[in-house]
């Protein structure tokens, strides 16, 4: 009989050993497995005599069914547990050691629950808490291989173990765009370009490109008449305008003044009203800014009307060199 029980105990230990549980739980389950056949021969085991042993037998030996451990139910504070009921709470397993067990948290009620050696791992190599470096830890140099080498051979990335550098033959770089649709250099028309006739819709005034005058653009607006200031020298600053109008009233009585122009644009059209004040008798000389050519064989000179409040008109077309002028008199 003793030999048969020893053989059965040995088989039980082997079976429990294959479960992969901790050594302490393995010892408890082995004892329970051996004690169960003996307990079955006992007619009555008083609860008051063996509460913990009976509870652990009920809770743990049944977990071996099917050759694996079955996790217990999760503890609920509103549930009434009987003696021997097993629950999971805060990463551990607990067995009730009282009847009518309700509202007693397993982790803080040792008179109601007993913990089983199972659940989450509390320590690793005797260390608990946050993972921090400690003496005798493995260092990076002791680890075999190189994590960066995992990228080596993964197209298009390659890793040079000797230099620790990555390279990528087809990856994007931060270089400036050098070509658009295969064309480089200045923007010029080419075959198969889109033409305006192929574009749908129409552009509004706010969508048209405007090049500032300072950058070589033209002022195509038609401003109101500009009043020039009379003096010995009068400068008409056209400001690269394509069209401009101004008036000059002789208020300084020195006999004559010189008219210079600046900022004229080739193809520009300019109109100047020349006016005498109530005194009259003043003259005008055409000065710098272009080569003056006056219609009617006037050469480069004009002779304003000298009567009081007389009004004459000087119309100019500029070709980049010459100012072709038409001088019309007495508009009053």
Image (cartoon, rainbow, N blue to C red):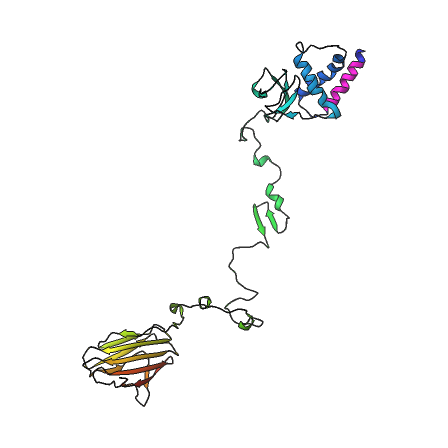
Give me the residue at 80% from left, 13% from top: 3
**Going by the image, does 246 lie left or right of 209?**
left
Give me the residue at 75% from left, 23% from top: 15
Q: Nearer the viewer, residue 65 or 86?
A: 86
Q: Position of residue 52 (x, y in %)?
A: 65, 14
Please state, as top left, top right, bottom left or bottom right, where the C terminus lies in the image.
Answer: bottom left
| Image vertical order of residue 151 relative to residue 324, above or below | above
Give me the residue at 30% from left, 82% from top: 314
| Image vertical order of residue 8 relative to residue 242, above or below | above
Q: Quadrant of residue 235?
A: bottom left
Q: Position of residue 293 (x, y in %)?
A: 33, 85
Q: Position of residue 230 (x, y in %)?
A: 23, 76
Residues in magenta, as a range: 4-17
**Going by the image, does 44 lie left or right of 175?**
right
| Image vertical order of residue 212 relative to residue 161, above or below | below
**Is 177 a magenta residue?**
no
**Is 9 a magenta residue?**
yes
Q: Quadrant of residue 233?
A: bottom left
Q: Main secondary structure of the magenta part?
A: helix
Q: Nearer the viewer, residue 142 or 234?
A: 234
């Amino acid at each position: 009989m003793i030999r048969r029980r020893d053989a059965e105990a040995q088989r039980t230990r082997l079976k429990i050993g294959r479960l992969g549980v901790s050594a302490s739980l393995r010892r408890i389950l082995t004892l329970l497995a051996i004690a169960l056949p003996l307990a079955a021969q006992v007619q009555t085991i008083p609860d008051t005599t063996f509460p913990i042993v009976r509870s652990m037998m009920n809770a743990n030996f049944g977990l071996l069914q099917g050759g694996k451990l079955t996790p217990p139910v999760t503890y609920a504070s509103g549930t009434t547990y009987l003696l021997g009921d097993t629950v999971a709470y805060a990463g551990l397993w607990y067995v009730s050691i009282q009847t009518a067990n309700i509202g007693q948290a397993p982790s803080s009620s040792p008179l109601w629950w007993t913990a089983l050696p199972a659940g989450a791992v509390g320590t690793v190599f005797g260390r608990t808490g946050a993972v921090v470096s400690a003496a005798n830890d493995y260092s990076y140099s002791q680890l075999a291989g190189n994590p960066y080498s995992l990228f080596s051979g993964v197209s298009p990335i390659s890793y040079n173990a000797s230099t620790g550098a990555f390279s990528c033959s087809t990856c994007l770089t931060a270089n400036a765009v050098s070509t658009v649709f295969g064309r480089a250099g200045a923007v010029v028309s080419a075959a198969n370009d889109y033409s305006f006739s192929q574009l749908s819709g129409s552009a509004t005034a706010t969508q048209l490109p405007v090049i500032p005058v300072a950058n070589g653009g033209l002022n195509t607006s038609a401003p109101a008449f500009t009043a020039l200031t009379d003096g010995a020298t009068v400068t008409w600053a056209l400001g690269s305008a394509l069209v401009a109008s101004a008036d000059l009233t002789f208020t300084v009585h020195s006999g004559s003044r010189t008219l210079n122009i600046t900022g004229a644009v080739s193809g520009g059209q300019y109109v100047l009203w020349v006016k005498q004040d109530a005194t009259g008798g003043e003259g005008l000389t055409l000065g710098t800014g272009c080569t003056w050519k006056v219609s009617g064989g006037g050469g480069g000179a004009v002779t304003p009307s000298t009567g009081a409040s007389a009004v004459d008109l000087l119309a100019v077309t500029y070709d980049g060199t010459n100012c072709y002028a038409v001088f019309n008199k007495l508009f009053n």
